[in-house]
Amino acid sequence: MADTSGIRKFADAADYRKRFVIQEEIDKYLPGGRHFIDENRINALIAATDGKPADPVRVREIIAKSESACETLEPEDTAVLMQVTDPALFEEMRAAADRIKHKVYDNRIVMFAPLYMSNLCVNGCRYCGFREGNSLQKRRVLTMDELKEEIDVLAGRIGHKRLIAVYGEHPSTSTEYIAETIETCYARQVKAPRTGAPVGIRRVNVNAAPLPVADLKVLKKVGIGTFQVFQETYNRKLYEQMHPAWSVKGNYDWRTTCFHRCLEAGVDDVGLGVLYGLCDWRFELLATVMHARDLERWFNIGPHTLSFPRLEPASGTRVPEESPWLIDDDTFARILVIARLSVPYTGMIVTARESPASRNRVLDHGMTQLDCSSNIAIKGYSDFANEAHQEKERQQFMLGDNRSIDEMVRYLASRGTITSFCTAGYRCGRTGGCIMDALKTGREGKFCKINAVLTFREWLDDFASDETRAIGDRLIEKELEGIKEWLPKFYPTVMKQYEATCRGERDLFF
């Protein structure tokens, strides 16, 4: 078990709200009280470019800069990209975003599943079904035995290897609880349905409330993957309207400095995101770029991932239907392209909040990760035999894409995209600063391609339907030919691992 003796304990929710935030851990990263999210600068950039046509020459210069340097753009550059309305010029941007994605990540899409551990919460976020006081929500916290039942389905029936574990903010889901659930996920082993091979969860990313440095160090020791915190909105005034001052989440500065504390604690893969639809998307994207640049300034490490959740219907609230800033599918696609060009090295996550049509559309807009066979009800995987079943009163919001993992893998393979279940980077130390240069030069994408092939072979043999396996086999043949072409001397070593995987060995990687 993880050593949690050094972290603070709280008597109840009131005590938690009163004592949880540590002001010194905020002030350290806001020297002189000056915040790295410069709202005046953002508003000035929006005002200066609003309604004005983009200069095609300048846009192409920025595209070239993004492709060649693979560094985070200046906010001024991102603002220029936001001006583009000409369809032909935007298509140039989209094509460049797709090229960058292939340079950094090759033709892989990483697959994961969300696993909600609890829906108890001390906060009052106006748009969220989990908020305190929502009497419609059916509350529970998974026990370790219930968690094992969830893993048995996720790893043993569906075939997932990578999770994003999601926690409400509450004393009952403390850092001790988070650490124990991570350890439980890693320890659980089951047998694959087709081959009987041992399978389990190999990487647990976490979506949780901002934590102090001491708590983050505990999670680092138990093998956390990416630590993900969504800002929801960077607009301070709107943030205060959506998050009551009495709540822990109402502290804007505590939330925005969370990733600085993560990197200080050694949790060196962090995931940013905003809730698109709460505020002007241009403001949010420019602020995201500023956030990434400030992390680079302090630690020379940018965000490992960006996520793009949109407001979705939730129990007990009308905010998702009534917000004046809701975005349509065209705008969503624009956001992804601009984000890929603005932070070219980062992973980009588009979740099952989106409709199937929306996710299919943006596969060539720079995205790198998606979830499938998802159920976000508390204990939803083991309670519901039908993966598409949803209960509004047991989940934070409603999902849009209920496709199974087999259906999605088959669709991706049919378009020449390999589904990766690889988690090797975290066990090989390729995280944080170690991975940044490799991503920017394209080296990491080549390593990951090999591991993607090995894990794809595993999944096809252990879980795929006959139809999906046939399409996947053809894709793997093509991928192996590609590896042979660009790594001829290393190819025999790759084939030894591949053949061992075909014989039933598991979790082989480079």
Image (tube, helix red, strand yellow):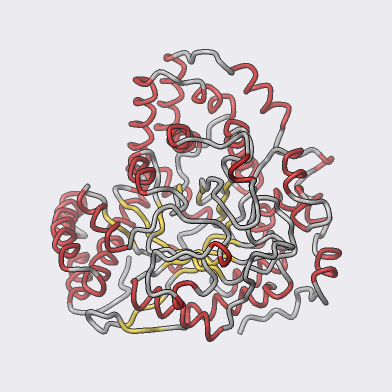
Q: Is residue 29 in sight in this rendering?
A: yes
141 with respect to 100 (left or right): right
Number of marks in the image? Answer: 0
Q: Which part of the image, by quadrant, shows the N terminus?
A: bottom right
Residue occupying image coordinates x 44% and y 69%: 427
* Residue 67 percent across, percent down from the top left: 40, 32
Residue occupying image coordinates x 32% and y 56%: 447
* Residue 2 percent across, percent down from the top left: 63, 81
Q: Quadrant of residue 229?
A: bottom right
Q: Which part of the image, by quadrant, shows the C terminus?
A: bottom left
354 up-or-down from 342: above or below? below
Residue occupying image coordinates x 62% and y 32%: 283
40 up-or-down from 269: above or below? above
361 with respect to 341 (left or right): left
Q: Quadrant of residue 466?
A: bottom left
State the residue in front, 130 or 359. Answer: 130
Q: Is residue 70 in sight in this rendering?
A: no
State the residue in front, 248 or 330. Answer: 330
Q: Quadrant of residue 297?
A: top right
* Residue 161 percent across, percent down from the top left: 39, 70
State the residue in front, 129 or 120. Answer: 129
Residue occupying image coordinates x 67% and y 69%: 120
339 up-or-down from 252: above or below? above
* Residue 37 percent across, percent down from the top left: 70, 37
